Image (cartoon, grey):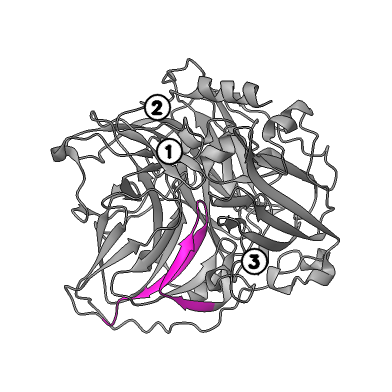
Amino acid sequence: MAHGNLSRRNLLKGALAMGGGGLIVATAGGSVRAASSNLPAKNMPVPYTNMFRRPPVLMPVAEGVDEKGPWQRYRVTQKAGLAAIAPGLTTTVTGYNGIFPGPTIKAKQGTRIELRVANALTIQRLNGLPFNTVTHLHGSASLPQYDGYANDSTAPGYCKSYKYPNWQPARTLWYHDHEHGMTAENVYAGLAAMYTLSDPYEQAQLPQGEFDVPLVVSDIAFNANGSLAFDDDSHEGVMGDIILVNGVPWPKMKVKPRVYRFRVLAAAISRSWRFTLSNGEPVHMVATDGGLMPKPVALKSWRHGVAERYEILIDFRKYKPGTRIELRNLSNKNNVDFKNTDKIMQFEVVAGSGPADPYVMPTTLDCGPQPYANRGALHVDQLTPAMSKARRKLSVERKHGLWTINGETWEDVQRSGFKRVLGNPQPYDVEIWDLENRSGGWFHPLHIHLIDGKIIARDNTSDGKPYAWEEGAKDTFYLGENETVSVIMQFITGDGNDGGRYMTHCHNLVHEDSDMMIQFAVGDATLNDPISSDRPISDGELEQPVTYGPSYPLGT
């Protein structure tokens, strides 16, 4: 098994312009490909010289109401585009509508969305393989055939319409590529974007509009000509020396004397973060992966793994105009840090206009009613161990050069005809999963598709409880070196067509590709086959008109 998979990984190398400033850095777990940009000094980005920008907001191409309620249709095209990131150079990215990050989709609870994703990536991979893609809406309780199953590939010249139910409470999601064996490269090259889901409870309690700000945080490295440098030959991880926020290196943002809400998405493929403000002031965390926290928490720093989303409030009302504050990165074990990877972005307070901001920092939050409570669905805070029908262990470690879960990989799933599953809970069952990191020298952000879970125990904290920032609904769980985390979850599938197979995997995407991913089933494992139920179709009109929503002034 190991030889077959590793040879496949060697074939897959070369999709981007490889090499450049790449170097191997030893870590406790082995080695990691740390990419120090090989740029001339004049082309190296300088922190806090570029203005902050928000990704554009995608507008629907059609909308209406039917017997099931409101619906909207959106279109995006995966294609190559040119980005100006390194001064004086252009970089080819492969993004949704040719940009990175891709356009933000703003969904409303109860409004079903159909997202048509067309693959127009006609550029040739250096290895001669087609630029196949899979789209996963991370954080959505989608049916298996619309969940971005790793082998549900869309080839160039084809498109697939993904259907998103949006019945869940308000939250920050993101859509990104999930093509088996190529996820790390495809996301690194640009296939990532934010997707927000709102509801009346979140809208009434947290800042909106101009003061609701997406932060897609990632790292990157360049070759001397401005092309992306990427090499995962170590299969440990890839970490760059340039930090991007919404595709801009170390931006500066002008902020008014208001309370701002920042949706922080860790979109790097391997790096973890420990965010903090340069002046030592706390932020107020109000939401996790799965939406509002019942009780906000004030924090001076927090640990943030790949694919986790945390929403924070920062109060700029107490600062004089001209005050500058940095969002910084204290980093974590087994990251590879460079000269400026401790910096993220800079805020500059400007004079406000109009009446003072009356917003009152919340001490509690109303998460709203639990959807499908009539079928037995419970909010994660209501789940108790006594409700659990099963307890399962997921042990992550490296064996024979492969990253594994319980000693298995996605190749084992493929060899079984995609039938092999970790377990088969029934819809609305409650289970406890013990997530155990036995790899020692590496952290693993473990993502479980479909569910919202609650951490009920950590073995590395003084009281055995989760960290303060984890006291909310989550779908991605940070497993630090030699840590074990216990998670309670309910398998809520919505109404009708219940069941099917879903993936769980490490969200260090280099680990996922090599080959740390398995699957579980909910209900009837043969229902809603994720590969055959709704196949991509040939697309004769890849280029479609793109309409974006209103933007905010530069730097805000």
Depicted 466 relative to depicted 147: above or below:
below
SS of the residue at dot 3? Answer: loop
Measured as percent of width and height from the top left, residue 123 is found at 41, 21
| Disc 2 to disc 3: CB gap under 8 Å | no
**Residue at 56% across, 70% down:** 467
Seen in the image, is 106 located left or right of residue 487?
left
At label 2, which amino acid type do we have?
Leu
Measured as percent of width and height from the top left, residue 407 is found at 72, 40
Depth order, front residue of 438/42: 438
Dot 2 corresponds to which residue? 16
Q: Main secondary structure of the magenta part?
A: strand
312 within the magenta span: yes
Seen in the image, is 500 located left or right of residue 555?
right
Dot 3 corresponds to which residue? 459
**Residue at 33% across, 81% down:** 357
SS of the residue at dot 2? Answer: loop
The answer to whether residue 72 is visible is no
